[in-house]
Amino acid sequence: MTESPRTHLDQLENQSIFIFREAYHSFKNIAMPWSMGKDSNVLIWLALKSFFGKIPFPVLHIDTTYEFPEMLEFREWATAHYQLKLIVKINEEARARGIGYETHDPVTVTHELKTVALQQALAEYKWDALITGIRRDEDPTRAKERYFSPRNAQFEWDYKDQPPEFWGQFAATTTKGEHVRVQPLLDWTEVDIWRYIQRENIPIPQMYFARNGQRFRSLGCSPITKPITSNATTIDEIVTELESTRTSERAGRAQDHHERNAMQKLRAKGFL
Amino acid sequence: MTRNAESLKVVFVGHVDHGKSTLIGRILHDTESLPEGKIDQIKQACAAEGMEFEFAFVLDALLEEQEQNVTIDTTQIPFRTSRRRYAIIDAPGHKEFLKNMITGASNADAAVLVIAASEGVREQSRRHAYLLTLLGIKQVIVVVNKMDLVDFSEQRFQEIKTEYQKFLVDLDLTARCFVPASAKSGENVAHKSEALRWYHGPTVLEALDATEPTASLVDLPFRFCVQDVYRFDERRIIAGRIETGTLRAGDELIFSPANKSSKVQTIERWNTEKNGVAIAGDSIGITLTEQIFVERGYVASHQTETPIETNRFRADLFWIAREPLRVGAPYTVRLATQDVKCQVVSIEQVMDSSTLEIKIDKYEQLDRNEVGRLTIQTRAPLVLDNHDRIANLGRFALVDDGEIRGGGTIFGGIYTDRTVAKSKNISWTGGKITPGQRALQTGHRGAVVWFTGLSGAGKSTIAQALERELFSRAMNTYVLDGDNIRHGLNSNLGFSPEDRVENIRRVSEVAKLMADSGVVVITAFISPYLMDRRRAREIALEGNAEFVEVFVEAPLEVCEARDPKNLYKKARAGEIRDFTGIDAPYEPPEDPEIIVQTDRQTVDESVATILEHLLPRLKADSADE
């Protein structure tokens, strides 16, 4: 009797679990940003797998105050369902200054309400590692990431001089003020994520499925996230749709396209 | 079926400007793997920069790269053919970027090595092939690119092929095939070329489709590397990854380097139907039938096929740090999940990784981008396999100051030879040696582990077993007990209450000094009074030594029944006075760091309990804080 060979999804899952466990061993004080989006929920799922049903570190929701109500409902449900240690962070200071989509451009608002909020949370909780759900295929600037990617105290990513990473050995140390982004989904593609959600039956917000001929392919702040035209109401239909489209995943996310190289600029400043 | 089949990772290497990025751009284009509008977007970007469009720009997404027109780091890009999916790893062609090349290529199943027909075999064409052998990548496709610049000349192609094949033979590497192509015009990449009709072999994509993933890891001897031991609920789950082989529930495993064995009770996965079998690549948990001590770094194997356990081995090592590697300097070996202090004993050969030239008379250090053949000695035993047998356990990173500085592959593993001691001493700068410096050298902090309990509870037995465990981890440790204290230092003391107090005071002071010198001191005395033990703790803390109180607990009846030295009998008979538990009190600890119950736990289980709590407190990196 021989065991059947592992599938592509099995390999991705195994590698992600390995990375989760290395991170949990290497760092004293970890948190996992959680946007309730599909990738984020896959990340939660993989963390449950890594630690046998109990996530031993807090999850962090950066609440921009422009969240879709359905996403917040999902947040409450999932927090109770998975028994998550949830931390919600809002950049109150920027909101008090009147920063918002009503008056400011999306790059500024995203920077203030997401990146700066994250910086504030890091300063408050002193995490030395953040587990993020970014994937190489999402955007060209993410293609060059490492599994363990150090950021300095200013949140900057020195992509020209990244630490070497080979044979399952990662850059697992930080000096004061630095943190490491741990990225277990780096090798996954958008289709992999969907196939995995389908295989594992992972709960996700219903906004990803078509209603009235429209669905969301990527979810962000409500004023700047546009649905795509779609009739896909099941994961199979979504995958079929993705396999025939060549439009990029984040095309509906306004902050990426506000100006040339917008994503590059956001990321250099510390955006996930 | 192909949809979920595993993907093949292919690294693209070759001399700078020989057309790697162009070839990748062309493959992505011809396999329709680019998002819609990507090409237009890049064309616009090129126009904005006043440049002619090139397929290479598909990869050069970062603004600065476009400015410099060079690839700076590794990328991983998916594409698929009708046969399977691929992940392209693009490795840079500049020699200062060895680090990134290694990062990218270390995971690859196969390599495409690009040589421009117009320039022929160049420095990096050779160097990259050598690095592929060092990384253990055996499936290599050589693409002779830019055939359009040599009028698609068969003669030119044959010249390059002959020259390069000769070089590969020296490296013991055989190319799967040589493919003439032009990435720029798309000849022989995805489609057969009219201009190259004299060539009857496969196109680049056909050649890739013909390669197979690296030899199956499932068929190799079983190796499970422990990442961590979790106790999130009542279960103790040993978490880790199976590097090679197959595991079934009920298998008898040996854990190295402790050489403890136990049967696998269950294979643990969350939210998956359990089938009791796990194979190479699986990240799993296991529970054991015996409560043996296991920690991160242990390697489990089957009894018939155990790994090598050694503190001395030879390796080929590449060095990528600015600071040179020096013979005698302290480093850390990270091999799978093991983390062991080491030093380089000798360097037998040094090679420049760009010219592949052997450096004569260079045996003391390895500079950046050099490759050396050397001998490494570790402080504690390392569990490994030779790289050609089980690659995953035969390769390691060399770490200094927490950063990866080099990597190597092991050959000809030598079995333990403790007579060859540390050949070079590490010299410290002047001034008083701090506990942190001591800990750095020994790999652990000093501490006082204070056992207390009734006579016959098992203090001495467990103390000696613990000492043996610590010693096997190359730690400095020593047991203080009645035998070595009463006969010398305290020979002038009797068993009166005052003398007992003085006895324990002297033991406390000696233990403090030894702990300060970096030793893990284990004391095995009844030490019945709370007051005395509190003083022992204060004395230790005065000397900044860690103090760990271990209550070796067993009911009086059990101890009396054991009565190893017939002392209880004598005390009952009135031959001994003031015997603890009979006619003198024992005050149990109120809040000991560790409790072992020897009427319920075996000696091994007791030692496992102590190790689990003690080892984290002895970590060198927590010193000086």
Image: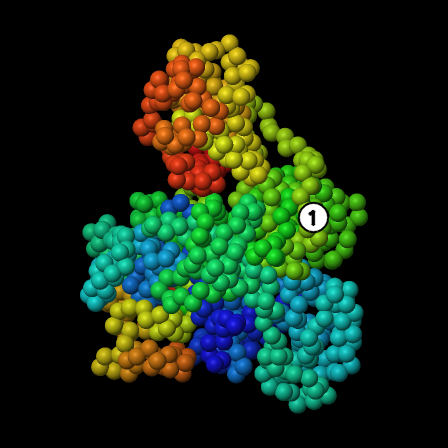
Q: Quadrant of residue B392?
A: bottom right
A69 and A270: which is toward the camera: A69
Q: What residue is drawn where x is 74% and y is 65%?
A: B172
Quadrant assignment for the C terminus of chain B:
top left
Q: Position of residue B469 (x, y in %)?
A: 53, 38
Residue labelled with disc 1 = B414
B370 and B315: which is toward the camera: B315
In the image, B481: left or right of B556?
right
Q: How many numbered circles are shown? A: 1
Q: Position of residue B352 (x, y in %)?
A: 72, 54
In the image, B371: left or right of A111?
right
In the image, B344: left or right of B400?
right
Disc 1 secondary structure class = strand
B159 and A20: which is toward the camera: A20
Chain for numbered disc 1: B
Q: Quadrant of residue A204?
A: bottom left
Q: Quadrant of residue B473?
A: top right
Location of residue B246 with respect to B309 vertically, above or below: below
Q: What residue is drawn where x is 63% and y is 63%?
A: B93
Say how the picture is coloured. rainbow
Location of residue B325 with respect to A205 vertically, above or below: above
**Residue B332 at least partly seen:** no
Q: Mark 1 is on which residue type?
A: Ile
Q: What residue is drawn where x is 70% and y is 43%?
A: B365
Q: Position of residue B207 (x, y in %)?
A: 63, 79
Location of residue B79 with respect to A51 vertically, above or below: below
**Residue B251 at least partly seen:** yes
Mark 1 neighbour density, 10 Å: few (under 14) some (14–19) many (20 or more): some
Q: Position of residue B326 (x, y in %)?
A: 67, 41
Q: What residue is drawn where x is 50% and y is 35%?
A: B466
